[in-house]
Structures are given as structure tokens and as C-alpha cells.
Amino acid sequence: MNSIKLILCLMLSFIFSQGALDQYDIPEYEYKTFQLSGNDLFNSFSNGDETTTTINMGANYMSVSQSPGRNCMYGLSFNYNSESYSYTDPDDSEWDEEEETTNWTMTAPFAFDQYLNDDTKGIFGFAEGSFDTFGGDAADGVDDTSDLFLTIGAGYGRVISARPVAQAYAIADALGIDADDDTIAAIASVIGSAASYESIYKDDAIQQYYNDLAEATGVDGSAMQIQKVLTSPAYNISDRFTGWNVKAGITNNYMQCDECDDKGSMMLEANYAMPMDMDSQVMVSFGYTSDLNDDDSIVGFSSPIYASLLNAFNVDEEIESGTVLGGWNAMSLGANYTKDHSYNWSTSAGFTYISETYSPGGYYYDYYDGNTPEYSSNATVLTVSTTKAILNQMSVTASFVYAKMGGDGFDDSDPITEISTQVTYWVF
């Protein structure tokens, strides 16, 4: 509770002290990409009387556009796999064997934000999700081969990534120029639209990008020095965000199986980014999710507490989905502070509190004859990390993670701590 009070005090202290980062405008760009892939496009392997043939191919399309009043992203990913196996017994044809399998998958992600009227940081509607389907032999006997996960909602405000401004100041400092606001804005505008260069300029994208940055600075021959600032591990420029937003929506699978009747869930989210000066900031976020199904129905559930712990301790493991009764809910509150002490030394500290409330389903539902108890659990995670580059040749990172679990699911559990260091040395 004391941690929550501290976060609220910080919000009140800095709500009216947005720095120059708050003036950063929204870069406008549009690009499309289309790729064909063939990882092991065709492979035929023979060993005596055995032959195995595989065909793998895929395609990826992506369209991204951003403007002050609208953000739009949609794409399509298709993968095809075919494998055939044959064996011919030279002595007995009864042992001959032939098998062939063919499978394909298709995914279409999308996200759309539309700001209403002329206020590009005011009321907006949004939709985001993904259409997934599969076919081939893996779909034989399967009634439900397609899913359409969709979140629809509305919100107010806008959080803008203003890291290009911090990078623009770092470039100006490295070049030794006393850049005015217009110069900083011109440099940041080029950096903000970096994602569009590959699609527009193809093989000349990198060259054109750094030439445009050099032109924005007004310093001839500075392209290579600018590249060093933006790509060298010795320059640690942490993320910058400015603004705030709140959003609410309904999430559901709109292509369920015939026997399924999942009503989805409701989500509420709020974010606030507070630039304190040109080299530090605080970000605060709040999230709440509530299942909309009846409390006597069985629904799938993946613990957000376990997901948060695995992410904090960088464990590469998937969360298995269990079953609970409808009406479960989860809440999270987080804060993150970043500080760039110098161009080669940065520190970040984070706090996350997450809770979940549910009633077990499945076996427990039958065991308790439909009257399963309600469980409430929570976890607090603290993280600190600092990275320093030494002599532009060595980088050292030290990290500390602390997690404490409580509630019904973690009775008498001990805290978890992790201290880690990482050293990188560039020999040449």
C-alpha cells in the first residue's frame, strides 16, 4: 500500500511538469512489406530404399501507416508444409510403405486506432486482434479450425514514443552543435519515420536514412558519426514517452466452436508517461480484466501472476492454461523509472503489483459439488538494472529482481531474488 501511495504522489508532483518532450509531434509515415520465404524450400533425402521429401514455403505481408489522426496495421502470414515418405522393400512388397502429410497455417493480425474530430490526442476508437486458421491433415476431424480474437473499445488521450527527441539531443551533443528547437524537431522527425525507409528505398534505405539525418543537422559529412550514436552499444539512450491515455474494451473469440459459448472479457487500461527532464522519466500503468461469463460456467484461465514472474526472471517457458469458473478478474499496477546518467550509463527501476481472483474449475468443481471456494493471490515484483559502457569497448550490466507472492495460492511462500551481471567486450 505504501508503494501505491508513493506512485500516486509522483503522479501529482509531475502532472504539470512535462518538459520539452511533451511538444514532440506525431511522425507521419506509411509503408508496406511483402516477403516470400523458403526455409528448406525443397529437400529430398534418400537412404537406400528410403526416400523423404519435404517442401516448406511461406509468405508475409504487412501494411503500416501512422498519422496524427489514425494508426493502422494489418498483415497476413501464410506457411505451407508438405512431407512425404516412401520405403520399398526389395524382397517383400508387403513391407512397402508410403506416407504423405500436408499442413498449412494462416494468421492475419490487425490493429486500428481512429481519433475523432480534429483532436489527435482526444477521444478515439480502437480495434485489435488476429484471425488464425489452419488446414490440411492436422484439420481432419477438427470442427473448429479458425479463431477470430478481437478487442473493440474506446478511449481518451495518447501516449507518444518520444525517444527520437532524446536521440536527436544525443546527436546534436555528439556533433557539438547548439541545435535550436526546429533542428531538434527535424532530426526527431527523420528518426520517427525510420521504419518506412526500407520499404521506400529498399537496398539504399540505410544510406538514405543517415544522409537525411545529416541534412537535418545541417552538418556536412556527419552521417557516419550519427550512425555511431544511434547504433553503438556504448550509447545508451533509454525509451522516452509522453502523454496519457485511458481505454476500455471487450475481448472475445468471434469464431468459436459450435458447442462453445464464451462471452469474453472486459478490459480497462490507463497509462501515464511523465518526462522529468531530457534524461529521465517515470511511467505509470494500470490494468484491469474481468471475465464476463456466468459464475457456473467453465472457462480457460492463464495466471497473469505466473506470466509476470516468468517475464521478470526471464524464464523461457509457456504458461499452461487451466480451467476456472466464469467471473474471474485480475488487476495490475506498475511504475518504471529510467535515468540516463550520461550517454554511456543508464539505470532503470521498476515496480509491479498484480493480483488475481478466481474459483477453480474442472476437477475441483466436481469435488466441491459446484461450490468451489474463491482464491485471491497477489505478487509484488521489484527490478533494478544499470548498464555502463567503459572506454567504448566494454559494456557491463548489473540487475536485481525481487518478487514476493501472497494470498491463497502462495501461503507461506518465500521471496524470490535474482542478481545477475552481463559483460560484453569488443576485442576489435
Image (tube, helix red, strand yellow):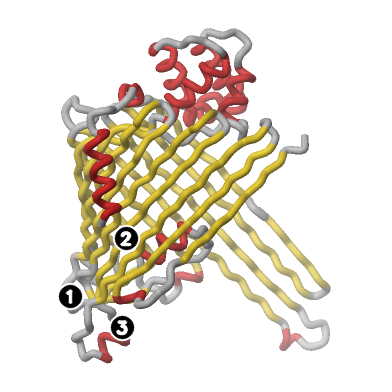
Q: Which residue is mark 1?
A: 295
Residue ID at (37%, 35%): 281
Query: Comparing marks 1 and 2, which lies closer to the viewer?
Result: 2
- First in residue order: circle 3 vs circle 2: 2
Q: Is residue 259 visible?
A: no
Marks 1/2: CA distance? Answer: 22 Å
Q: Is residue 62 visible?
A: yes
- What's the residue type where badge 2 is placed? Ile
Tell me where residue 164 sits by quadrant.
Answer: top left
- First in residue order: circle 3 vs circle 1: 1
Q: Is residue 303 above or below residue 367?
A: above
What is the x, y in percent for residue 288?
24, 56
What is the x, y in percent for residue 236?
54, 34
* Element type at mark 3: loop
* Element type at mark 1: loop
- What's the residue type where badge 1 is placed? Asp
What is the x, y in percent for residue 305?
36, 65
- What's the residue type where badge 3 is placed? Gly
* Element type at mark 2: strand
